[in-house]
Amino acid sequence: PEIADNEYDKLFKQLQLAEIEHPEWVTPDSPTQRVGSDLNSAFATVNHLVPMLSLDNSYNAADLLAWSKRAGDLAGDENLQYCVEPKFDGASISLIYENDQLLRSATRGDGLQGDDITLNSKRIRNLPLKAPFSTYGIAQIELRGEVLINKKAFEKLNEQYLEKGLPPLANPRNAAAGSLRIKDSTEVGRRNLEAFVYHVSYMQPSDAAGEKAIPQSHSEMLQMLWDCGFRSPVQELKLFGRIEDVVAWCNHFETVRDDLPYEIDGLVIKVNDLALQDQIGSTTHHPRWAIAYKFKARQAISVVRQVDFQVGRTGAVTPVAKLDPVPIGGVTVSSISIHNQDYISEKDLRIGDTVIIERAGDVIPQIVRVLPEKRNGTELKIDFPTHCPVCDSALYKEQDEAVWRCVNAECKAQVIEKIIHFVSKDAMDIRHLGEQQVRRFHELQLLADIPGIYTLNWDAVSQLEGYKQKSVENLRAAVDDSKRQPLHRLIYALGIRHVGETMAKTLARSVHHLLELRQKTLDDLMQLNDVGPKVAQSIVSFFAQIQNIEMLETLEKIGLNMKHDDTETNEQGIFSGKTFLFTGTLSTFKRSEAEAMVEAAGGSLLSGVSSKLNYLVAGEEAGSKLEKAGKIPSIRILTEKEFLNLMQYDKSD
Ligand code: IVH
């Protein structure tokens, strides 16, 4: 997530309100018109019997009071009974039991259709494969629930990940959602998943009446599920007759949430009477008879001990507050970016201040506010430097910007950051030369600038600790290979301000040779796709600097590719702008052939799974890449057959 859940919800609410006032603004693709999609084509898509709705959110007493008033009005009854239960922070599932057997289970998907994960869900040990619904006279039933990985199992799983050298999973929610999409269901079994079941969305009576009566209230329904062998929240639920008591319970529960063995992100309040639920009804997005009470982001208190100023690749000077380390939401926080001078003044932040810090979900920690009452007079003002903390040249700030910059192109900090960017994966992708190695080589005066990468003293490198013959060879080969990278990668690698990967592609396509960019005026550049005055100015400034031109000439002499290959991209192709990755064994083509097909259709290939990937084509025995891709909802996973269908589409088009 780019923003915290509560910020997202605030924006979502604002949109909802705007759409109520202006129904003509509602577009079919408005976020209010759907509940989010996690469809994954590695699994069959199935229809839910009843759409899987989301929940409306509340954050305070006023929200809850307003909700209960409206629910009461719709029910025609002010004295509603409320059932309050945990809001499990996992992956939602839908389960269908027919004639007492688990028939099918599915992910939420887009709310109407989900991925069929029946096999995987059968590996969840606390999910009964058989349940005696017939004793209630129920022939078919659709249940809703959440699959979780408890905190202990999550820690264990992450230890295993670390042992295997894999990056740890961000949180139990992602771990549970990812686990459900693993293709190998025996591996799913090893994950110790648990399912909580909290809602009956559909019931079909059997011909014969059951010996037990079907419950008339939600809490009794949870009891029925429990009696049928499910882990429903009967132990956790609380019933209330007054919304004020619900509010008090929510406030209390928030203080003890960390005592639970599993993660919750709030409570869910439901009108308990099922007949009244029906009467109150639902929107296309959420039931009106229920509401989530979302807990605030986890907060902690710490003290700012010092402020460091870091100089980035573009010379931007960022103040970073160093704090007494505090654990918060599963990570220990000891330094936080405090952005810029305006931010510091706005918060009136001083060294020695006690501060409240917050980390919402996976979002990076931030300082919420200072506690001035904790001051004792020894706090120090944060003096923003007037000169670069690394090279001591005077800092410069553009009029409409908040950021101070070091504009000395030779500043050591910038030089190192520029080299790190140049070699990085999305730029020249020089493996075996990462941030650590760049810093080390620079420190040892083996690497002074970007061209220096190609004139490294290999004898000196092979003398270094950790560099055996093989690793020197690998590094040399990687450096050499990078000379042949396509032009757009080189342009991106130069780290020109405002020139990201896509812009680099646009620029590469506009020339035959990199140095032609030197001739382009602001107007020429602004004719190109997506190039505004800011980007154009930045490009013109880059090519106006003689040091940059000299560096490019040196790189060309060294043998770096500076030419744009016209056959490289096909803007009209159906895959133009799309990224692909193949994994596993393909049966119809060799992988290299399939890759060539993608490129011919205008697509590009990525070497690893990241959020930049659009399509993962999974052949037989696909392994960790498929698993990783399954955790990133924006990636479409295609079977070989689906990929071929897409290609056919290209031909017939
Ligand atoms: S009731 C119509 N109860 O939270 C039924 N949902 O953020 C609506 N969730 O989509 C769901 N714990 O996946 C319900 N005790 C609980 C829940 C719960 C977690 C999930 C559910 C929902 C999401 C909304």
Image (cartoon, rainbow, N blue to C red):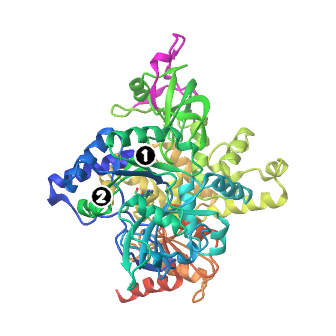
Would residue 226 be found to the left or right of residue 467 on screen? left
Determine the secondary structure under disc 2.
loop
The residue where tag 2 is placed is 527
Residue type at numbered disc 2 = Gln
Residue type at numbered disc 1 = Ala
Magenta span contains residue 1? no
Task: Say if 6 sits above or below 148 in the image.
Answer: above
View quadrant of ligand 1: bottom left
Q: Can residue 362 be seen in this view?
A: yes
Q: Which of 289 and 367 is in front in this view?
A: 289
Task: Say if 226 sits above or below 264 in the image.
Answer: below
Badge 2 density bin: few <14, some 14–19, many ≥20, Cα 10 Å: few
Q: In which quarter of the image is the C terminus?
A: bottom left
Magenta span contains residue 385? yes
Badge 1 density bin: few <14, some 14–19, many ≥20, Cα 10 Å: some
Task: Name which residue lies at 28% across and 42% down.
Answer: 65
User: Residue 100: horizontal and vertical position, in percent?
Assistant: 50, 79
User: Residue 647: horizontal and vertical position, in percent?
Assistant: 44, 84
Extent of the magenta region: 368-397
User: Residue 412: horizontal and vertical position, in percent?
Assistant: 61, 35
- Tell me which label, 1 or 2, sits earlier in the chain: 1
Task: Name which residue lies at 54% across and 39% down.
Answer: 312
Q: Nearer the viewer, residue 139 or 115?
A: 139
Mark 2 within 8 Å of ligand 1, using the beta carbon: no
Q: Nearer the viewer, residue 571 or 508?
A: 571
Nearer the camera: disc 1 or disc 2 = 1
The residue where tag 1 is placed is 4
User: Residue 433: horizontal and vertical position, in percent?
Assistant: 68, 53
Main secondary-structure element of the magenta-colored stretch:
loop
Distance, label 1 to label 2, CA atoms, is 37 Å
Where on the picture, by quarter, is residue 143? bottom left
Q: Can residue 92 be seen in this view?
A: no
